[in-house]
Amino acid sequence: MSTKKIAIMQPTYLPWIGYFALMDTVDEFVLLDDVQFARRSWQQRNQIKGPAGAITLTVPVLKKGKRDQLVNEAEINAEIDEANKHARSIQLAYAKAPCWSKYGPGLLAEIVKPRALLADYNIALIERVRDDLGVKTKLLRSSTLPIDGKREDRLVSICEQRSAGIYISPTGSSDYLRDSNAFQRTDIDLLYNDYKHPASYPQLHGEFVSHLSAIDLLLNCGERGLEILRSGINLVEAVKFHAR
């Protein structure tokens, strides 16, 4: 049986460290960009930390006539200059961070680069943060793969199409994966990353705040960020996890 490992996640905006920790556990990370777009979700927002605490950054997306659309169809509202506002907010929050000079300018350049589609924007930023953190995992877009089927069957189809023998999932998907029995009908091993956010790491602006965008870890800790990120990885077999 293949020992190739895959994880599958929607492309979110400046994801938290658990997203990159999951990515780091697999050989290929598939960005699920051809499923329904969910408004007001992590696909278009995340948080950083400023002097007053957590700050939410939201990418504006066109709404009119866009009720049912796929992730890779969602368009950024170019009439609202939010990208430059996000860049200014990030610079104000992290200009004094230890690793700002190494990673900050490149990150800001990517944030202000014009893009029409939210998925393209998110994926470019994911690639940037992945590379800066030192994660080596290959990224693929599900829309480029010959797959079909409903939600859980689609995950199996991706694994089969990529010849993967192990699927690693975040624990948030455990209920529907258990109820669907999709992976139990295959030879693909199902594992969960029961990720534990680090209790703390060096961070600006007072008391530690967890579950921020991974850029907080990157700009504060730089090359040490990958080691810190990996400290929370906890892979559990599906049978053992579901028995809890």
Image (cartoon, rainbow, N blue to C red):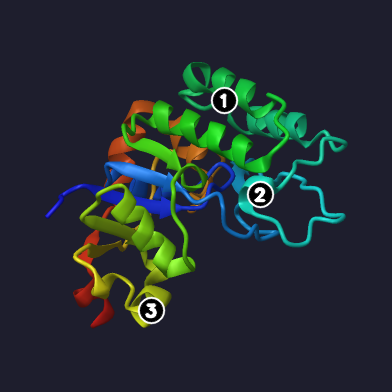
Quadrant assignment for the C terminus? bottom left
Quadrant assignment for the N terminus? bottom left
Is the residue marked by circle 3 packed among few (<14), some (14-19), or many (20+) residues within 10 Å?
some
Of helix, strand and loop, which one carries label 2? loop
Residue underneath mark 2? 44
Q: Is residue 193 visible?
A: yes
Q: Is residue 227 left or right of residue 125?
A: left
Query: Which of disc 1 and disc 2 is earlier in sequence?
Result: 2
Residue underneath mark 3? 180
Where 235 sits versus 52, above or below?
below
* Amino acid type indicated by mark 1: Leu
> Which residue is at a point 64% across and 29% down the rendered structure image?
111
Q: Which mark is residue 107?
A: 1
Query: Which of disc 3 and disc 1 is earlier in sequence?
Result: 1
> Which residue is at a point 47% across and 59% down the rendered structure image?
148
Where 89 sits versus 184, above or below?
above
Q: Is residue 51 left or right of residue 187?
A: right
Camera-side mark, 2 or 1: 2
Where 73 sits versus 185, above or below?
above
Camera-side mark, 2 or 3: 3
Indicate the position of residue 120 as horizontal and vertical percent values. Answer: 61, 36
Q: CA distance from mark 2 to mark 1?
A: 17 Å
Indicate the position of residue 224 as horizontal and vertical percent values. Answer: 32, 31
Query: Which of disc 3 and disc 2 is earlier in sequence?
Result: 2
The foreground one among 103 and 205 is 103
Indicate the position of residue 165 as horizontal and vertical percent values. Answer: 20, 55
* Amino acid type indicated by mark 3: Ser
